[in-house]
Amino acid sequence: MAFISIRGVEHYYEWITADNSAQRGGKPVIVFLHGWAGSARYWESTARALAGDFDCLLYDMRGFGRSPLPQQPPESSYELETYAEDLAELLEALNLSRVCINAHSTGASIATLFLNLYPEKVEKAILTCSGIFEYDEKAFTTFHKFGGYVVKFRPAWLASIPFADRVFMARFLHRALPSDARKAFLLDFLMADEAAAIGTMVTAVSKRAAVEMPAEFARLSVPTLLVAGEFDRIIPAVMGKQAASLSKKVEFVIIPNTAHFPMLEDAATYLQRIRDFLPAAA
């Protein structure tokens, strides 16, 4: 367990390596980005499966997981570009000049921006459950209003209610996950900073994102694999296919019988797909 200060916020990060060292082991590096109101915890099993060939860097983004905002946070926006710049500073602080990236959901949108801002820093990228969407003012306004209520009303006792974790994760999954994994997702949601959770929700699902993200996908110059879950209701596979079609640098695959967490719902298929795409280990 380690922390590093990035633009006034202590960021939690950890290395997962073949020898279980807390330090990088000298192999090629993959950096994992989590999605909205989550943490790097749900990437641990994927990272451990890849640690024989790669040093895996996991971190919690500002305001989420184990990277809480200070009581008097530095002035900053919750635009996705802010989080992309955080990643750039994290890599610089850890002396990582070139990496692979595996990012999920909102984290994949952040990674897409990062790939276009710093293409020289990335060898290959995997965007898991990402895509483009059309702007719908009424739907977006309703989503933001409802989402704001959900974020503001998050009593800690929710975690102790039987089956609360099952209800919380139902919309995200096609295949069931173990109870401890579901509970970890619920706890991450309850831990998320209110301002960060609402701010990133509003910026990720916005008119600006709907207008600009197609252009960002079209600009991609880094070899990229976009992975979709067949039954994903959060970011349907058709949205991922549309995004992938905008650039010849993007390959598109669907993991059958999974939803928004294909890396957990069908780990074997997911790992095979990304191993086929990632650079061969030295």
Image: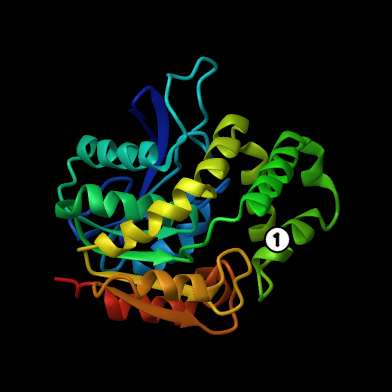
Q: Please tell me whether residue 37 is drawn above or below residue 42 in the rendered image.
A: above
Residue sticking out furthest to the front: 137
The answer to whether residue 33 is visible is: no
Q: Please tell me whether residue 252 is drawn above or below residue 212 in the rendered image.
A: below
Residue 166 in the figure: left or right of residue 182? right
Residue sticking out furthest to the bottom: 256
Q: Please tell me whether residue 37 is drawn above or below residue 109 in the rendered image.
A: above
Instruction: Classify the position of the C terminus by image quarter.
Output: bottom left
Residue at image position (38%, 52%) is 212
Residue 2 in the figure: left or right of residue 168? left
Residue sticking out furthest to the right: 162
Colouring used for the render: rainbow
Q: Amino acid at mark 1?
A: Met
Task: Residue 246: give x, y in percent of width and height.
Answer: 32, 71
Task: Residue 86: give x, y in percent of width and height.
Answer: 33, 37
Residue at image position (41%, 34%) is 11
Residue 94 in the figure: left or right of residue 34? left
Residue assigned mark 1? 169
- Secondary structure under the numbered disc 1 in the rendered image: helix
Number of numbered tags placed on the structure image: 1
Task: Residue 125: give x, y in percent of width and height.
Answer: 29, 63
Q: Quadrant of residue 12?
A: top left
